[in-house]
């Protein structure tokens, strides 16, 4: 990766972190919930419990937590599929 690509990737990362930080609390909790379901930590049937756990576990910024998760994109896509939502890819 050259310097230009690195700067572009860093800008994308920062833009995504800012987007997540700008979500309201419920939206951030839903995003964590979606990731946990996609990761297989919880099932869709446990939605109220997952949301409560996500609220309790919010000890640092959601963006920091999510963006430090390896395979985040896959977990989010799998979470969407678990909830019966289609994921489109390019």
Image: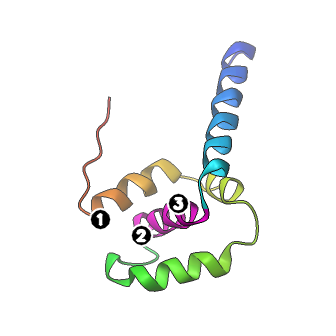
Please report whichever mark, 2 or 3, sits nearer to the chain's N-terminal start: 3
Q: In the picture shown, does residue 8 fall above or below 14? A: above
Q: In the picture shown, does residue 46 fall above or below 89? A: below
Question: Disc 3 and disc 1: Cα gap in Å?
Answer: 18 Å
Please report whichever mark, 3 or 1, sits nearer to the chain's N-terminal start: 3
The dominant secondary structure in magenta is helix
Viewport quadrant of the N terminus = top right
Disc nearest the viewer among 2 and 3:
3
Q: Residue at x 75, y 72 (%)?
A: 59
User: Are the residues at dot 2 and dot 3 in contact (C-beta closer than 8 Å)?
Assistant: no
Q: Secondary structure at mark 3?
A: helix
Q: Which residue is mark 3?
A: 27
Q: Residue at x 61, y 77 (%)?
A: 55
Q: Quadrant of residue 8?
A: top right
The percent coordinates of residue 2 (x first, y second) are 70, 15
Q: Secondary structure at mark 1?
A: helix
The percent coordinates of residue 57 (x first, y second) are 66, 77
Question: Disc 2 and disc 3: Cα gap in Å?
Answer: 15 Å
Viewport quadrant of the C terminus = top left
- What's the magenta region? 25-39
User: Are the residues at dot 2 and dot 1 in contact (C-beta closer than 8 Å)?
Assistant: yes
Q: Is 24 part of what is drawn in magenta? A: no
Question: Disc 2 and disc 1: Cα gap in Å?
Answer: 7 Å
Disc nearest the viewer among 3 and 1:
3
Q: Which residue is mark 2?
A: 37
- Seen from the viewer's position, the closer of residues 1 and 44 is 44
Q: Which residue is mark 1?
A: 82
Q: Is 33 part of what is drawn in magenta? A: yes
> Would you call the spot at circle 1 few (<14 residues within 10 Å), some (14-19), or many (20 or more)?
some
> Would you call the spot at circle 3 few (<14 residues within 10 Å), some (14-19), or many (20 or more)?
few
Q: In the picture shown, does residue 19 fall above or below 3? A: below
The percent coordinates of residue 88 (x first, y second) are 28, 39
């Amino acid at each position: 990766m050259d310097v230009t690509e690195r700067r572009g990737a860093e800008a994308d990362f920062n833009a995504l972190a800012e987007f997540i930080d700008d979500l309201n609390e419920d939206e951030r909790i839903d995003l964590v919930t979606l990731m946990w379901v996609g990761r297989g930590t919880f099932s869709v049937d446990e939605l109220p419990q997952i949301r409560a756990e996500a609220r309790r576990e919010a000890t640092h910024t959601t963006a920091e937590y999510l963006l430090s998760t390896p395979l985040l994109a896959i977990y989010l896509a799998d979470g969407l599929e678990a909830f019966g939502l289609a994921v489109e890819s390019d």
